[in-house]
Amino acid sequence: MVTMEHSMIKFLLGIIVGAALGAWGYAYFENQQNRSNLDKTRQSVSSGASRMKEAIQERVDTQEIKKEIERTGTVVREKAKKAGSAIADATADARITTAVKSKLATESALSVFSIHVETTDGLVTLSGTVDSHDQVARVVQLALDTDGVVKVISTLQVKAAK
């Protein structure tokens, strides 16, 4: 009888340990699968957001710039969606102007000395001369991509070919 009770205890103990190991294994693999699914979902959302950003992001078309300059002598572009209002403090315009000029200085094809930048309440006005319509488009795009800018007006002139 003692051996039968002893065997029964071992059997029950084996079942309990087996059930505990099974539950632990199930939880472990389920958690790994959930992490994998979570990572896949996170990547999917991130790539979807990137594609959406690219689709919404403003693009400046060189041909449109050229036609507009020929027609009116002025290029005006506004951000389609304002991420927020322009900075309200008194130094905002100076910071925007400095940021645009800094971006222009990093562009080797552009002469920061031939482009004048002025900012009033987030409205950036560009004037001066550049070598091509591509450069007008690039300057307008750089200004639009600057935080705090809500509108860009360009009266940049393309130098006549010699």
Image: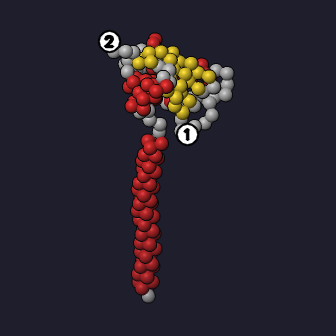
Front-most of 127 and 84?
A: 127
Regarding residue 105, the answer to whether it shows in the image is no
Q: Residue furthest bottom?
A: 1
Regarding residue 90, the answer to whether it shows in the image is yes
Q: Position of residue 94 (x, y in %)?
A: 60, 19
Give SS at disc 1: loop
Check the image and report above or below for 104 versus 49.
above
Residue ID at (42%, 58%):
37
Q: Position of residue 120 (x, y in %)?
A: 62, 22
Residue ID at (49%, 25%):
72
The kind of residue on which mark 1 rests is Lys
Name the N-terminal-most of marks 1 and 2.
Answer: 1
Disc 2 target residue: 162
Render colour scheme: secondary structure
Give SS at disc 2: loop
Q: Quadrant of the C terminus?
A: top left
Q: Position of residue 148 (x, y in %)?
A: 58, 29
Count of numbered circles on the image: 2
Disc 1 target residue: 81
Front-most of 25 and 63?
A: 63
Circles 1, 2 touching at the beta carbon (< 8 Å): no
The kind of residue on which mark 2 rests is Lys
Residue ID at (42%, 29%):
67
Residue ID at (38%, 17%):
131
Q: CA distance from mark 1 to mark 2?
A: 40 Å
Circle number at residue 135:
none
Q: Quadrant of the N terminus?
A: bottom left
Q: Position of residue 137 (x, y in %)?
A: 43, 27
